[in-house]
Image (tube, grey):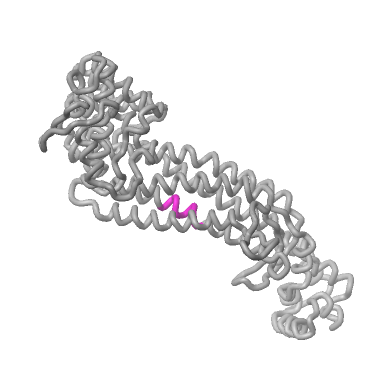
Amino acid sequence: MRKEKDSLGEMYLEDELYYGIQTERARTNFPVSGIHESAYPKIIQAVASIKKAAAMANQQIGRLDDEAAKAIGKAAEEILEGKMDNQFPVDIFQGGGGTSLNMNVNEVIANRANEVLTGEKGYERVHPNTHVNMAQSTNDVIPSAIHIACYFYIEELLPVLEQLAQTLESKRIEFDQVVKIGRTCLQDAVPITLGQEFSGYKGFVERNIVELKEVQKHCLSLPLGGTAIGTGIGVYPGYIEAVYEYLSSITGFPFHKDSNLFDGMQNGDFYLKVSAALRGLATGLSKMAADFRLLSSGPRSGLAEISLPAVQPGSSIMPGKINPVIPEMVMQICFQVYGNDTAVMLAANRGEVDLNVWEPLIIKNLSESFEWLTNGIQIFIDKCIKDIKANGEICKENAESSLALSTVIAVLFGYEKASTLAKEAYLKGSSIKVMAVEKGILSKEDANILLDPIVLTDPEKSSQLFTDYIAKHSLKN
């Protein structure tokens, strides 16, 4: 056992622990969710990167001796390598604006640095506040760490979205000639190809990739160096320039100082931008997943226009039933992302005067949204989208029998005639094509050409056919 003390008194800790008295107080103060800081390694790694960069910067300007700086750097590097993952036991629901998180990292680094230098844990050579936290405070470290973590979360999400776009493009090509009926308000509309529908899904994904890349640029701007409230108290000349240079070297990306440190520490609209991007992505993913559930419904009493891969039995009582479990999983992730976004909005909204103290909640919700979307989309690709099959005959039959083909009659002969024809076709259980020929509105040859659903999915081809027919027959609506 080793003894540590702080302003509240003394405490004994197990020798194998690298965290210290302030972490232990926080651990016992907040037994809330069982979700510890260690559940969000990118945040821990971001804080460790800042600590290493700060030590190197303070060494460069002569504020920290070489041995201490190198030992701090080594300890921080071990955190980055995942060697200390079990040393961050504080619940993510914690008061103090992330002070417990910051001090947890400070204590782990200090104890490990002392061990490197002296062979024993303790703060004889490196102190968590005096040395590891030099020229920093929780108030500039934690928001900076969130920015850094978000950058890397986006860096992980983007390749998965690129893969999703590529998979949807392959399906667009595969389904290019599968004609089906379009649907608006869940009612029959004009023909469309399944490939065209998938091109819409792909377009949504590509647009979100662009938007996330734009948000990622904002992640590079940090309030690091503002210390407590933006005034930079405790920062010595040359530190800010050096810390950003080292931080960029450590992370591999050009992080830089906010143009206004007071703004960077007071306001949480950056978090809203990130969360809104994830919410927007979730809305389209949920809609896509819901469409797949609807289009695959059946297989005998639903739409059954596509078949999803069977990944598990769907009922404990009905043999042979297969449920669309992967789209349903995706939709549940999206619903939770909406809830996380609301929590982020409320946390950002309640920042007060010179600081937002609700950043632990922001960390939790942004981190979870990123991780769940990244994991969920990969599963969506691998276990659903890439193996979707088109039921071409059902699609074609629905397209040819749709009363929405009366739109062609409306274009050529006017809305009233088309409406009358559609009503009669409905009452007789017939098709627009059969009724148009039977009523002498179109010849059989013209009906086969003008009412071919696949032709109607090509705007240039259908427009030219209509123009030629109107000219040939001197029609006037």
Looking at the picture, does residue 238 appear above or below residue 289?
above
Instruction: Tell me if residue 376 is in the magenta stretch.
Output: no
At x 46% / y 58%, what residue is drawn? 335
Instruction: Tell me if residue 279 is in the magenta stretch.
Output: yes
Quadrant housing residue 183: bottom right
Looking at the picture, does residue 248 appear above or below residue 42?
above
Of residues 239 and 82, which is closer to you in this image?
82
Of residues 218 and 36, which is closer to you in this image?
36
Q: Quadrant of the C terminus?
A: bottom right
| Residue 285 shows in the view | no
Horizontal side, residue 200 vs residue 279: left or right: right
| Residue 186 shows in the view | yes
Of residues 45 and 94, which is closer to you in this image?
94
Where is residue 212? Give x, y as percent: 46, 45
Where is residue 473? Give x, y as percent: 83, 74
Where is residue 259? Give x, y as percent: 27, 38
Horizontal side, residue 404 vs residue 84: left or right: right
Magenta stretch bounds:
276-283
Quadrant housing residue 455: bottom right
At x 23% / y 41%, what residue is drawn? 26
At x 27% / y 55%, what residue is drawn? 349
